[in-house]
Image (tube, rainbow, N blue to C red):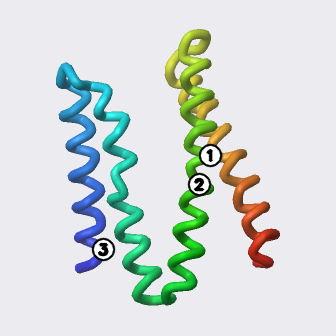
Amino acid sequence: MNLILKALTGAIVVLLIALLSKTRNYYLAGLLPLFPTFALIAHYIVGTERGVEALRATILFGIWAVIPYLAYLVTLYFLIGSLRLPYALISAVLCWSIAAWILILFWRRWYGLN
């Protein structure tokens, strides 16, 4: 049942993004993915299953996780003027992936995880 609820929540967010993109306030479609829908689910699961300290670490990692998203947005912003949209999106996702990989490496070293 929990899995169905999570899938339904994701589907609702996707529908809202699609609907917002068709309005005159289309730019709000860029804000909606940042609503902490999945963060709420993750924080609840970690908090109930792993405890407060694990939840604090998860929250702190989430703060740092903004950096890969920022790398994605900045890359896409600059590339959409010179590349076709699919290539700009792929490049931005690649930059997000590299930034996320670097973040994970530093996080593991900082927290002493392997």
- Within-10-Å neighbours for mark 2: few <14, some 14–19, many 20+: some
Residue beneath disc 2: 65
Q: Position of residue 37 (x, y in %)?
A: 33, 59
Q: Where is residue 49 in the image (x, y as percent from the top left)?
A: 45, 89
Where is residue 44 drawn, in percent x and y?
Answer: 37, 77
Classify 10 Å Cα crowding around label 1: few (below 14), some (14-19), many (20 and above).
many
Q: What residue type is labelled 2?
A: Ala
Residue ID at (21%, 43%)? 15
Residue underneath mark 1: 68
Type of amino acid at the residue the image marks with label 1: Pro
| Secondary element type, mark 1 | helix
Confirm or deny contact between disc 1 and disc 2 (CB under 8 A): yes
- Position of 83 with respect to 18 (left or right) is right
Q: Name the residue under label 3.
A: 3
Indicate the quadrant where residue 64 lies.
bottom right
In the shown orientation, is residue 43 left or right of residue 15?
A: right
